[in-house]
Image (cartoon, rainbow, N blue to C red):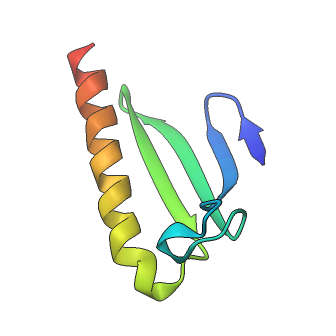
Amino acid sequence: MELVPHRRVVFTYGWEDGRLGVAPGTTTVEIDLVEEAGATTLRLVHHGLPPETVPDHQQGWAYFLDILRDTLSAS
């Protein structure tokens, strides 16, 4: 795990039951926050996913990032 307050979080990812073909600690998620022109851009990269699981994870991350965006926009 890596943590740079207000800038970066890196953690391993997986499901205890191996759901979606990803066992615990077998992939890495990097989240970077970059301030630009008064706004913050979130960059998320998920490394090490088995190719057949990428579409499901893309859909999942997009879904939850949309919820985060909508929640922050409403604040």
Q: Is residue 21 left or right of residue 75?
A: right
Q: Is residue 22 left or right of residue 67?
A: right
Q: Position of residue 36 (x, y in %)?
A: 41, 36
Name which residue lies at 46% across and 51% down.
Answer: 43
Instruction: Answer with the quarter of the image where residue 69 lies.
Output: top left
Name which residue lies at 35% across and 57% down.
Answer: 60
Q: Position of residue 75 (x, y in %)?
A: 27, 13
- Name the residue nearer the viewer: 3 or 38: 3
Q: Position of residue 53 (x, y in %)?
A: 43, 78
In this view, 51 is above or below 64: below
Name which residue lies at 62% across and 62% down.
Answer: 14
In this view, 33 is above or below 47: above
| Number of marks in picture | 0
Name which residue lies at 69% across and 63% down.
Answer: 24
Q: Position of residue 11 (x, y in %)?
A: 69, 52
Furthest-front residue in view? 17
